[in-house]
Image (cartoon, rainbow, N blue to C red):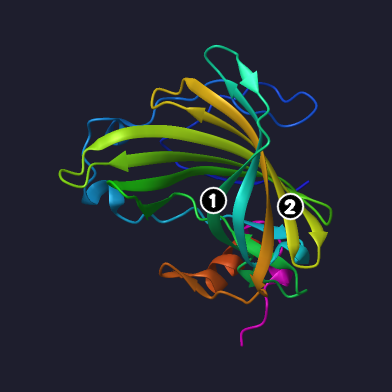
Amino acid sequence: MTEAKAQDASQSPSKRPLQGGVNLDDTLPPVPQEFQIGSQIGDAQLRSQTPDNMWFPIPNWLAGKWHSETKLIDYVQDCKTGASQSPHLVVKEVDSALHGHQRDKTGRIWEFIQIPQMRKLGLAHGSAYVRAVRKDIIESDPQEVIIKVLSNQITVNDKDQQIVSSNQVQQIGTYTQLDDGLVQLNASLRNFDHDGTPIQMQKQSLTMRRTAPYQDIDTLDGLDLKRLLADYLTKIGHPELIPASK
C-alpha cells in the first residue's frame, strides 16, 4: 500500500473507522467563512498557494494524458430521505486528465499531488471554481490505483463575484486497466452542503482513453518539479532514487 496525502490546513475531515475498506465520510466540517455563500471571491482567495511537496508512484498503464466523453451513473441516494434509485444513466461529461510528472532513477513514474489548488471553470451563467482541498492515496500498485479526494465547488455571480453556492464533494475513485491506453474509473461520490451536511451519494463509472503518452513535466504552475521530486525522495529516505541531472 502506498501512503501519501496532501491537505489544506483549513480542513480536517472527520473519519469513521475503516471497516473492510475505505469509506466516504458521514459529515464534513463547514467550508471556511471566506468560501461560504454570500462571501465575495477576491484576490486573497484566488492567490496561488504553494502546495505541500507530496508525491506517489503510479503504474505505467496510468501514465500520460487522458480523455473521457461520458459517464455512467449507476446509483443515486438522497442522504436526507434515504430514497435511492439505479438509473444506469449515461451523461455527457467531457473531461481531460494528466497522470504522472517525473521519473526516478529506476524509471518509475511519480505523480505530484497539487494540493491546495484553485481552478476556474466557465459556465453559461456565472463562473465556478473548484478548490482542491485534500487527496489521499489509498492504494497504488500494478493492479489498481485508489484515490480519495475532497473538493469545494463554488459558483459565483459574475456581476459582483458573490458566492451563490458552495458545496463539498468527496470521491473515492478506483482506476484499473482495461487494455493498453484504456482505463476504467469506478467512483463513489458524496455531495455535502457548505455546512458539511450530506446531500446526495452517487456511484458512477467512466472509461478514459489515452490521448498522449507519458512525458516528463519539469515545471508546473511555476513549480520546479525536478527539484521537488529530488527533495521528496530525500525526505522519505531514498536519495539513491534521484535521477541524474541532464
The amino acid type found where label 2 is placed reads Gln
The crowd level at tag 2 (other Cα within 10 Å; few <14, some 14-19, many 20+) is some
Give the image quarter of residue 164: top left
Q: Residue at x 64, y 65 (%)?
A: 100
Disc 1 crowd, CA 10 A, few/some/many (<14, 14-19, 20+): few
Q: Can you give x and y, in whole percent of width and height, for residue 12 in the image?
A: 49, 31
- Indicate the secondary structure of the residue bearing disc 1: strand
Label 2, label 1: how many angstroms apart (C-alpha)?
Answer: 15 Å
Q: Which mark is residue 93?
A: 1
Mark 1: which amino acid?
Glu
Task: Indicate the quadrant containing the C terminus: top left, top right, bottom left or bottom right.
Answer: bottom right
Q: Is residue 144 left or right of residue 34?
A: right
Q: Which residues are magenta?
A: 235-246
Near-viewer residue (24 or 51): 24
Percent across and percent down for residue 240 are: 73, 71
Of helix, strand and loop, which mostly describes the magenta segment? loop
Does residue 128 lie above or below 192 as drawn? Answer: below
Outermost residue toward the left?
A: 160
Give the mark nearest the N terminus, 2 or 1. Answer: 1
Mark 1 and mark 2 in contact (Cβ < 8 Å)? no
Q: Secondary structure at mark 2?
A: strand
Give the residue at x 22% y 51%.
43
Whether the magenta-drawn stretch holds residue 123 is answered as no
Image position, residue 18 (x, y; %): 72, 26
Label at residue 21: none
Q: Nearer the viewer, mark 2 or mark 1?
A: 1
In the rendered view, tell whether residue 129 sits above or below residue 202: below
Q: Is residue 165 left or right of residue 245?
A: left
Residue beneath the point at 73% across and 75% down: 105
Query: Is 170 placed above or below 90 here?
Result: above
Q: Which residue is mark 2?
A: 184
